[in-house]
Image: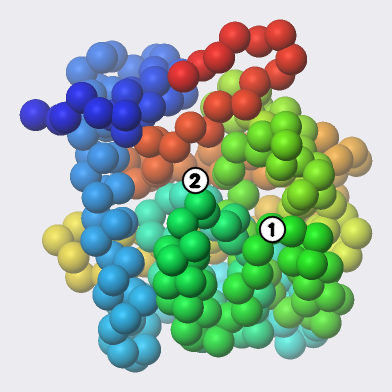
Amino acid sequence: RIPNNRSRRIAERNLELCFPEQSLAERNRLLRQSLMEAGKGLLELGPLWLWPRERVLQLIQGAVAGEETLAEAVNDKRGVMLIAPHLGCWEIAGLYYSSRYPMTILYRPSRRAEFDVLSCRGRGRMGGQVIATDARGLRALLKALQRGEALGILPDQDIGSDEGEEIAGRVFAPFFGIAASTMTLVSRLARKTGALVLLTWAERLPRGPGYILHLRALPEVVEAATLAESVTALNQGIEMVIRTLPEQYLWAYRRFRTRPPGEARIY
């Protein structure tokens, strides 16, 4: 039986909004699976941040399909934006890439300073530079791209009205057919620098042997005619990969918390 707590209620609401074509039984099955996967994600943090480096990297099963595109872009000093939605184990994706490429990782500070210290240490343990979403951090991101390095960004975060300017703006763009307050940072940087935009996610394998790391190029984010079209292309790319692995998405997150002016609250 699933506890009737806040995480469950948020996940239920998100699944109801994003999969209206499914039956209640189908959504409940997906709800149960997704909450179990979210629990695994919490349990993984200790090993990923504390185990010996090689032991962590050995959890990636097989070669990463498409990694040659990433390597070529870094070697050519083009700059790469690795876009990792809250799908599967995003923490190991950042650790893997930062162990192989010069990388700057963006994070949103939490309200608990002690957790920030621990998470920054863990996320930067393979050599990545971990920076906060503030003006200094944005300058560091642009400089890293101009040097031809890689960036790691979690793009599917709800951007409140008081946060938009902090991370270079926001727009409402469709996500599963619902207006979602979405950061424009990825699109602005990609269009300004011509950086390669790669969507990446670490698929958690059943029964604990490790993860399969995936990469998918999103050229339409760079090539879109307008900023709004670019952000929409980003959300569409994220939605596409979530639909291939919906049970491993973080449905317990309030992705639709911020609403357009005059629209009713969702949660």
Task: Identify the disc placed on residue 133.
Answer: 1
Report how far apart the C-alphas of labels 2 and 1 lie in the structure.
Answer: 25 Å
User: Do we see residue 241 in this rendering?
Assistant: yes
Q: Which secondary structure, mark 2?
A: helix
Q: Nearer the viewer, mark 2 or mark 1?
A: 1
Q: Residue at x 73, y 79 (%)?
A: 149
Which quarter of the picture shows residue 180? top right
Q: Residue at x 60, y 37 (%)?
A: 158
Residue 162 horizontal side relative to residue 245, left or right? right
Q: Residue at x 36, y 76 (%)?
A: 49
Q: Earlier in the sequence, mark 2 or mark 1?
A: 1
Q: Which secondary structure, mark 1?
A: loop
Residue 28 location (% of width, % of height): 23, 24
71 vs 160, nearest the viewer: 160
Q: Label 2, on which residue?
A: 241
Q: For the residue carrying disc 2, how many other residues have a C-alpha within 10 Å: few (<14), some (14-19), or many (20+)?
A: some
Q: For the residue carrying disc 1, how many other residues have a C-alpha within 10 Å: few (<14), some (14-19), or many (20+)?
A: some
Q: Split into 4 quadrants, where in the image is the N terminus?
A: top left
Please determine whether, in this image, residue 232 is positioned above or below residue 22. below
Which quarter of the picture shows residue 136? bottom right
Figure disc tally? 2
